[in-house]
Image: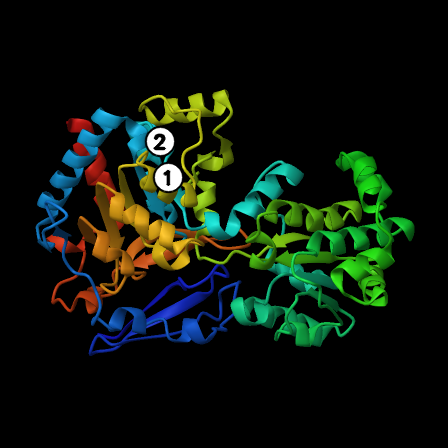
Amino acid sequence: MPESFKTTCCYCGVGCGIILHKDRNNKLHVEGDKDHPVNKGMLCSKGMNLHYTVMDTSDRLLYPEMRYNKNMPRQRVSWDQALDRTVAVFKTLIEKYGPDSVAFYASGQCLTEEYYVVNKLIKGFIGSNNIDTNSRLCMSSAVAAYKMSLGEDSVPVSYDDIELADCIFVAGANPAWCHPILWRRVEAARAKNPNIKIIVSDPRKTQTCAYANVHLQLKPGTDIVLHHAIGRILIENGDIDSSFVKNHTEGFEQYSKQVMKRTIAEAAKICDIDEHLIREAAAYIGDAKGFITMWTMGLNQSVIGVHKNLSLINLNLITGQIGKPGSGPFSLTGQPNAMGGREVGGLSNMLPAHRNLANEADRNYVQQFWGGKRIAPKPGLSATEMFEALNDGRLKAIWIMGTNPLVSLPDVRMAEAGLKKAKFVVIQEVSNRAETLQYADLVLPAASWIEKEGTMTNAERRIAYFIFCIQCTVAFNKTKCTRASSDHQYFFALVLYIFLLQLLRI
């Protein structure tokens, strides 16, 4: 019988609601959920074609595969064989080299529950903090900047604020392409209120720039100079909220001294922007009743990404444009669950519920709650450090889930060399085309988006539900549902839970 289910798109951090339809022939198609508060029925080209990711079974991994040494080809094995082998290898390495000899590299594609299980396993029971995620590559700068400026990694903006703002500053981002449904809401707000001012800083001329009142086409790497120049103009023109600054911020005097070190003309020359454009942008910000800053990888993916983030967030703080409707600093998340992973501590220097790994009281609380081993105070290896550690021998085994470091890491050659040197590599993957598979000692087939149940948190910190089943055997081309106990159909969280139980029994 035809069926329809409400679920969530798994492509990006916007978190659009979709309705998934199954016809009499088990064919799927999707449409936007008109009742969903995020997208209100709209879908981008990726979301509209989401069903093909499970209907095309040509490259799906279906069974565990394993090799007993590096010179052997992998062969199909049962789940019990795969898990027993993994437990034995991890246990041996941990006993010989210590818990920091193993690591888990997760992904912003993981469900929050999956993040939590593997985080609990490595930190709470193996006794190492060696878990990190590909979200480190895109969001760690924003995480650090939020914590330094606001005290917590919590985005203080919702999508509804877009309709309430009258000035939006987009820095180092092209949401018209990368977050299209979110940008449709900006366009709709602009159509309803033509007085909304849009400022874009980007070295390139993008589709987002085409919609801007002011395009600040700065020289790459000069973002902080630009933000400080705008801050200086706001201070000199009296367009700051002195009461908010006095009662809710610290360090304004030092900030003021810093931005006054360089004239606007000097800043314009460094940024290679006409001075009048910087002043025009500052005027729009100073006149705004609701001011939102948006940014993504143009600021985050930089050796000084944290400082770039801070320099932009400071514009919200000095104007008091935070904590009220239509205002705030808004880091646009790239992956569907980069935020959910952060919420449950899925980084090497974090604990669940935004608790601080460096804080002894937080460590003791989580340790007592989990009932496991002592949580180590030293941060674990970050995403890039894991592959450096594989190269120099500090790290012996790595479990990679739902991500391909041979595509996404900044130094792919170093990552490839590390996988070659690793004593044991586990790859948890959906597709048989991933480059990492050639280095895998164990391959575990992962479930795709409609084949598991759980939650993700989008860019505005809205928790979305992902449905499980809907004849998800479409992906596996089977006759019975994945709720059955077929050995290749356990999804990732269950795999880790079994692994944990076996590890504890040994």
Taking the image as shown, residue 476 lies to the left or right of residue 364, namely left
Q: Which secondary structure lies at badge 2?
A: helix
N-terminal label among 1 and 2: 2
Amino acid on which the number 1 mark rests in the picture: Ile
Q: Which secondary structure lies at badge 1?
A: strand
Asked whether disc 1 touches disc 2, contact meaning CB atoms under 8 Å apart, the reply is yes
Amino acid on which the number 2 mark rests in the picture: Lys
Gap between marks 1 and 2 measured at Cα? 8 Å
Kindly identify the residue that appears in the image at 21 percent across and 78 percent down. Answer: 24
Q: Position of residue 182 (x, y in %)?
A: 57, 66
Q: Position of residue 465 (x, y in %)?
A: 39, 55
Residue 364 is labelled as none
The vertical placement of 433 against 109, above or below, is below
Q: Position of residue 74 (x, y in %)?
A: 11, 54
Q: Is residue 321 visible?
A: no
Q: Is residue 223 visible?
A: yes
Q: Which residue is mark 2?
A: 123
State which mark lies toward you, 1 or 2.
1
Q: Position of residue 104 (x, y in %)?
A: 32, 41
Kindly identify the residue that appears in the image at 32 percent across and 60 percent down. Answer: 449
Camera-side residue of 253 and 500: 253
Kindly identify the residue that appears in the image at 23 percent across and 52 percent down. Answer: 439
Taking the image as shown, residue 104 lies to the left or right of residue 425, namely right
Taking the image as shown, residue 117 lies to the left or right of residue 341, namely left
Camera-side residue of 49 and 480: 49
